Image (cartoon, coloured by chain):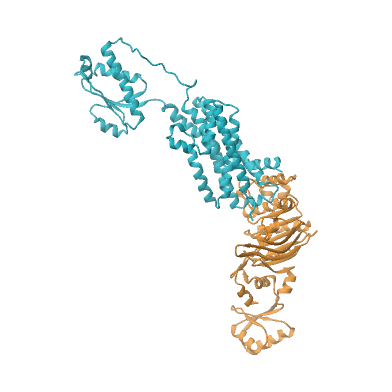
Chain colours: A orange, B cyan
Amino acid sequence: MIPVEISSVKKSYGDIKAVDGVSFSVNEGEVFALLGPNGAGKTTLIEIMEGLRKRDDGTVKVLGLDPWDSGYVLHRRIGVIPQDFTFFDKANPREAVKYYGDLFGVSVDADSILKEVVLDDSVGVLFENLSGGQKQKLGLALSLVNSAELLFLDEPTTGLDPNARRAIWDVIRALRSKGKTVILTTHYLDEAEQLSDKVAIMNHGRIVAMGTPEEIIETHGSGERLEIHGTEELAVYLRENTKLNVVYNGKGVIDIAIIQKRDALVALTAIEKSGLEWHDLHTRRDSLDDVFVKLVSGRIDEKGEIKVENARNDSHDKRRR
Amino acid sequence: MASARRIASDLRLFGRGYLRNVAGLFFGLIFPVILILIFGAIFSSGFSGTITLYYQNKDVLQNKDVGLYSASFLDALNRTNALSLVYVNESEDFSQYLSTHSASDGLVIPEGFSANYSSGNPVNVTVYGNPSQSSSSIVSGVVSGVINLFNLKYYGGPQVSPIVGVSQTTGNAQVTKYIDFLVPGLVGFSILVSPMFSLVSISSEYKRIKLFKQLSLTPLTKIEWLASKVLFYILLSAASFLLMVAVGIFVFNANIVLSLWLIPFLVLGPMFFASLGMLVGTISKSTETASVVGNIITFPMMFLSGTFFPITLMPMYLRYVAHVLPLFYIIDGLNGVMIYSNYAQAAIDLVVVAVITIVAFVAAARLFKWRED
């Protein structure tokens, strides 16, 4: 059975189309990442799949069930970390796992589950005194209590420091190696790249690209490029004297698309002829980052997080393409 | 289907959390006991007792001795046990003295009182009072009684005794003391306060931090969750009831009846207020609104339902107000059982409480949502 199959799913809040016709399926044992900036509709979509939100339109099958109508049955078979996971302040992780075990009617070894998420050092610390990373690990532990075959992790590492993020990644990798199907949302590119078999890039409620990271780069990337450090004057010279696609980034870097192999030769000859200063020549391909920036018209900050300047400005987006 | 196992598990987690929260524990268990100790101490000693009467005696003889008859007049006043006499020096301006002591009741015995009395010349004592205060009419009544006795003895001689007398008794077999009202009143107070405030706050807070949404992803149902809160506050109210009754009986010697009739009130009361608190938290958009609405509902009930004093002490229009407050029926029922052993009254109250509890619980369970559309 295909664990998750959705087609033409729509959800609006007033005038805002949070999810605007999304279709995809997730295969068993796959780690599927929904990647997109804040406000792209990832959480709405994942909550529709979890049965926490009602869709306006489209079909959704999760483990063969309609999540909204059969939520109560479905919830016994899936594990979930909601966004901003929280728990009762005055309970500790061991009690929390025990509580979830009782609710699901399964006998659990709290300590071994907590060891699995590397929280065994804080089993007796009250939730209110746990760090952000520890809280998130507890959320992960609770999603494991019912041994679900399908897990939904909504921004499992948002706001965590790099060490805590890596610890969570290790747990997710371990889940994958056990053959679990995992759907996660993230706005960290590296997270999607590191963890997932398949990535769907979401923006403005739509999926703008989907596939393995390599497939996405192949389809949406620009191919090979020549990068040269030089002045704007040089860029203008190249544009006027060759038929190459030359882009100047405003900060001393000139970017030349290499469509055929001889394009590189043409570029270098022209540079030599110009007699202008240049240095640091190298070639590069679009990374997932570059593709992402193109697709969502945003930029990536120093933490690898996507920032969108004109989140709802579609015309700007098209002009750049 | 509701599962006892899940309710028990939620009850255990919630109860443990509650016990770890010092503030909750204080307001749930200790605070009502402190109230009983304070109000019991204030009203058990002084309230039923005496009215303070300031007096000046200007009936002084040449040798500075107090006149014989004025002395025995004051002695007779003293023996009524209704007044506590406080002497004011004759050099003081009496009206001024009363007002600086925020007092209204006073008595001045004039110069030559003894001489006039013994020679049969009419003489007046002056009583100061404020007609709007009940204490003033008590003072003038007591003073008139003593004056009548003096007049009687003047005409009939010292050995004369009155023909018509009074023998005192009370309607009930037992005399009802203030503490007897205070125990059921404060039991009602704690039945109101803990479940109400707690459910208003947690239901709006859990909604805000999306904890309900998270719980909806487990097999726990909202009815089970609500049932576990109701059970918890029934247990807490029972514990607080036992503490208050123990303090009432052992510290203040309260005369209260403990009967199985109390159980339905101690079960339905917390269930009603937990459901009401849940309703308030559920229908309010934010935690701030919830707490304001909660306070608007709670505070009038806290004072007007017969918690700190019997409602018979209130003016008529406030008694009508009391009759629309749910807590009134709980306290009235508790009074019926614990003070008067009036089970017919308690039965009527119980019916009212049962009906509103069912309505509140069903409404809370219906309106309260785990997840949003």
Q: Residue furthest top?
A: B159
The quarter holding residue B198 reads top right
Quadrant of residue B274 in the image?
top right
Q: Residue furthest left?
A: B62
Q: In x, y percent, where is residue B31?
A: 51, 36
Which percent across, then down, holds residue B212? 63, 50
Seen in the image, is B91 located left or right of residue A51?
left
Q: Is residue B291 visible?
A: yes
Residue under the point 39% across and 16% down = B166
Q: Residue at x 30, y 16 (%)?
A: B149
Q: Is residue A231 above or below residue B48?
A: below
Residue at point 42% right, 18% down?
Answer: B168
Give the residue displayed 54% in from the left and 43% down from the top. B197
Looking at the image, can residue B236 be seen? Answer: no
**The one of B74 and B294 positioned closer to us in this rendering:** B294
Indicate the position of residue B362 as horizontal and vertical percent values: 62, 43
Which image quadrant: the N terminus of chain A? bottom right
**B268 to B60, vertically: above or below:** below
Q: How many marks?
A: 0
Q: Position of residue A40 (x, y in %)?
A: 64, 65
Taking the view exactly as shown, the residue that stands out farthest to the right is: A1
A303 left or right of B163?
A: right
Out of A25 and B366, give the one closest to the viewer: B366
Which is more toward the observer, A36 or A65?
A65
Image quadrant holding the C terminus of chain A, namely bottom right
